[in-house]
Amino acid sequence: MHYGDNTEKRKTSSSVKVNVDTLNSAHVASQFTEDMYFINLPTFRIDQEEDLKMLDIFCNFLVNESPYKKLILISGSNEYKNYFCDKFDMKTTHLYDDGFSSKKLGFRKTEAGFTHKEKGSLQSLLTDCLYIQDSPAGYIDFMQTYNTYRDELFKYGMSKYSNSYYDTFITRNKSQAIDIIGKELKLHKVYYQ
């Protein structure tokens, strides 16, 4: 579920140059150690803060019951970063001021109470990707971790959301795009500064 081996990195002829300034800092990077794990929480916002309530149970379980005790939250939502980092003593990369909200969710999500999705910019994405790639910290795939621990999560309080479309959405999907990227970054060098 986590990916820590990023020793076989190289630049090839298929590399693409992207002209985006990143905000990477040696001071911030020095906080991310090999006993820590990057994680991205999906930033779909749901009526009555159902997303926060469910992710709260998930994070509480991770830091108290799983091997993933020290987390580094990457997310397109500063609200999530403030809330989860304060509550669970997580680290984060940066609070970015260039995020945005998208209300283009599709009929099923809208009918299920999803209101919008908070997203970050290309600059914040690339900054976080460089931290993931160049850090000794591992990477956790949110959906795979949720599905692996789903039975335990239900015993931990998630059962009250068993009829939630959010639970269905997580269990039906394999990985978020950022999780696919995060896992790849731990295996192969993708970004060069």
Image: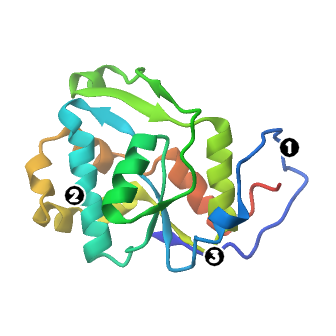
Residue 149 visible (yes or no): no
Label 1: how many Cα within 10 Å (few below 14, some 14–19, many 20+): few
Residue where numbered disc 1 is placed: 17
User: Label 2 sits on what residue type?
Assistant: Ile
Specify the label residue 53 is tagged with: none
Estimate the x, y position of residue 19 in percent, counting from the top left. 83, 38
Contact check, label 1 and label 3, Cβ < 8 Å: no
Q: Is residue 99 left or right of residue 122?
A: left
Circle 2 — which element? helix
Residue 49 visible (yes or no): yes
Residue at image position (62%, 75%) is 136
Which is more N-terminal, label 3 or label 2?
3
Residue at image position (62%, 44%) is 125
Residue 138 in which image quadrant: bottom right
User: Label 3 sits on what residue type?
Assistant: Asp
Q: Quadrant of the N terminus?
A: bottom left
Estimate the x, y position of residue 75 in percent, counting from the top left. 48, 47
Residue where numbered disc 2 is placed: 57
Specify the label residue 5 is tagged with: 3
